[in-house]
Each structure stands twice: as C-alpha cells, then as structure tokens.
Image: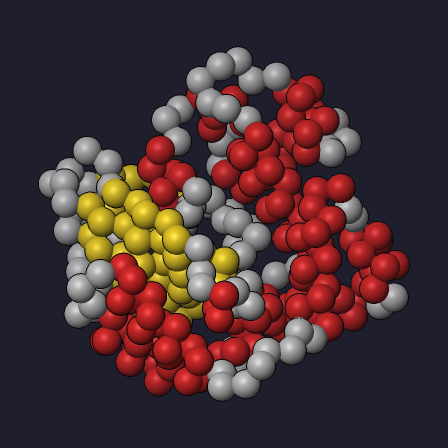
C-alpha cells in the first residue's frame, strides 16, 4: 500500500511565493522508506499526525513544522502509518526574505521553523477538515505576515534567471547577463539560500534527468551525458551519485514511486 499524494496549484494571490501544495496521507501499517532527492526549491512541511523519521544522514524524528532547504545530497526518510502531511513548495529567495531568515540548513539537515510565525498556522491547520480549508488558512497567514505587494530584488532575479536558463547555463553566463561578479552572486545566495548558484545548477541537472528518463529499461549513459550537458560519462556518474547516493543505472531501474512522493513529483 502506497501513500496517497494530492497536488494543487497555488491560487493567484500566492503565486509569487508558492509553487505547489502537496498533501500526503498514509493509513498503512508497514513503514515505508525511500529517498528525498533535493530539488531547486524549498518546502515548508507541516506534520499533523504521526511524523516521518529521517534515517540518513542522521537518525531523528522530523519536527511538526520545519523547512526543507536546498541540500547537496539526498536524504533517506522513513514514513510510518498514520501520516497526514502538508508540503508547500516555495521559491527559496522569496521565502527567506518573507520570514527574515537564512535557509542554510543547521546540524539537523533541516531549517527550524520560526515558531512565532509558522506554529500558529500549524495549530489552525491541524484541525482543518479539508485540503482547501488548510490552503486557505495558510494563504491568510501569508497575507497577514506580508501585507504589501512583493517586489522582487536582485537575489530573486538571479534565482529566476538560473531557473529560466536551466541546465543550458553556466555560472559565467549568469554573472555576465546580470553584470555582477561571481563573488557577489555567491554571497547573495549564501545569505538567503545557504547554497551556491553552482549547487542550484547541479540540482537542476539531476532533476531534469529524472524527469526525462523513464525507469525500467536499459540506461543509455551517453544519452544522460547529452541530456544533462555533462563533459563526459565519468563526470555525469560522479555528479549523479554524489547527490542521489546511487549510480543512474541503479536509481532508474528500481521502483521510484515512494521517492517521487517524498520529492514532490
């Protein structure tokens, strides 16, 4: 038995911040384990009942509310029965500015939730009777917290440009187009995202390969090298394994249903 995952687009009033709402419920008795493969965005996670447990790279139960940041490697998650979880995928540069915090992960691999800001929302949403009601509670919380029109700044524009260019870009291309130094761009990203532009581009590559490669068949490494714009096969395998912990062949051959749910796909 697999968890049920439902996905919703955000209403227009939240599109400047939210990319996707995901609701996961699991009533099975058997604990399920797989990987959360980091993406190019961050998520606010609300656990309303039983809580998943991170088992790699640390072994610890996840908090009721936390922020899943940009990380350079996949994490292994164990999901028990009785799960009722809401995951809000957000634009990281906007979220960090909204909450007034850096999204650099701490020793626990996740970012602690600002208690005065997110715990009141969790308290209200845990008693919500439907997905729509919980989304509306969250929307009201955001509008109350940021009660003016959001105007993107230079860090927002830098992040958006990298996503627009995707895997076909390099850090040099980005700094040239923005007319900023690499040092300035690195500093802006570290302050707000706790990550570097190079890491963001690496995550875009890995997730692009995931989205464009179907599982179950023989993996053509040359195709992956070409699709991911890697220098050669050795570069591609090393990069893929450093993030997912598996070779592309091992990753794409197995059942990825749980990994997709954990990773918001």
Q: Quadrant of residue 179?
A: bottom right
Direction from residue 101 to residue 2 in the image, left or right? left
Looking at this view, name the residue that lies furthest to the front.
Answer: 12
Looking at this view, name the residue that lies furthest to the left.
Answer: 29
Q: Is residue 201 above or below residue 192?
A: above
The residue that appears at 64% across and 40% down in the rendered structure is 205
Direction from residue 127 to residue 107 in the image, left or right? right
Q: Is residue 232 visible?
A: yes
Q: Is residue 186 above or below residue 31?
A: below
Q: Is residue 78 visible?
A: no
Residue 251: image location, x then y, percent: 47, 28
Residue 42: image location, x then y, percent: 49, 60
Q: Quadrant of residue 234?
A: top right
Residue 180: image location, x then y, percent: 84, 68
The residue that appears at 44% across and 61% down in the rendered structure is 10
Q: Is residue 52 above or below residue 110?
A: above
Direction from residue 206 to residue 88 in the image, left or right? left
The residue that appears at 40% across and 39% down in the rendered structure is 260
Q: Quadrant of the N terminus?
A: top left
Residue 68: image location, x then y, percent: 43, 60
Q: Nearer the viewer, residue 151 or 231?
A: 151
Q: Quadrant of the C terminus?
A: top left
The residue that appears at 78% across and 70% down in the rendered structure is 184
Q: Quadrant of residue 96?
A: bottom right
């Amino acid at each position: 038995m697999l968890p049920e995952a439902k996905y919703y687009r955000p209403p227009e009033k939240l599109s400047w911040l939210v990319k996707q709402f995901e609701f996961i419920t699991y009533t099975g008795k058997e604990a399920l384990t797989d990987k959360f493969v980091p993406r190019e965005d961050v998520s606010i996670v609300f656990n309303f009942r039983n809580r998943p447990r991170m088992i790699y790279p640390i072994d610890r139960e996840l908090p009721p509310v936390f922020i899943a940041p940009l990380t350079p490697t996949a994490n292994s998650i164990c999901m028990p029965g009785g799960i009722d979880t809401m995951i809000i995928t957000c634009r990281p540069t906007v979220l960090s500015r909204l909450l007034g915090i850096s999204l650099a992960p701490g020793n626990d691999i996740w970012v602690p939730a600002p208690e005065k800001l997110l715990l009141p929302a969790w308290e209200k949403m845990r008693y919500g009777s439907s997905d729509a009601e919980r989304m509306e509670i969250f929307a009201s919380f955001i509008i109350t917290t940021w009660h003016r029109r959001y105007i993107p700044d230079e860090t927002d524009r830098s992040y958006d440009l990298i996503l627009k260019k995707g895997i076909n870009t390099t850090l040099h291309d980005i700094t040239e187009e923005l007319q900023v130094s690499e040092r300035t761009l690195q500093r802006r990203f570290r302050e707000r995202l706790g990550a570097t532009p190079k890491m963001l581009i690496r995550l875009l590559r890995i997730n692009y390969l995931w989205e464009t490669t179907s599982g179950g068949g023989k993996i053509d490494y040359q195709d992956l090298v070409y699709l991911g714009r890697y220098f050669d096969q050795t570069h591609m395998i090393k990069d893929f394994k450093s993030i997912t912990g598996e070779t592309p062949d091992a990753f794409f051959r197995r059942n990825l249903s749980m990994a997709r749910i954990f990773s918001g796909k």
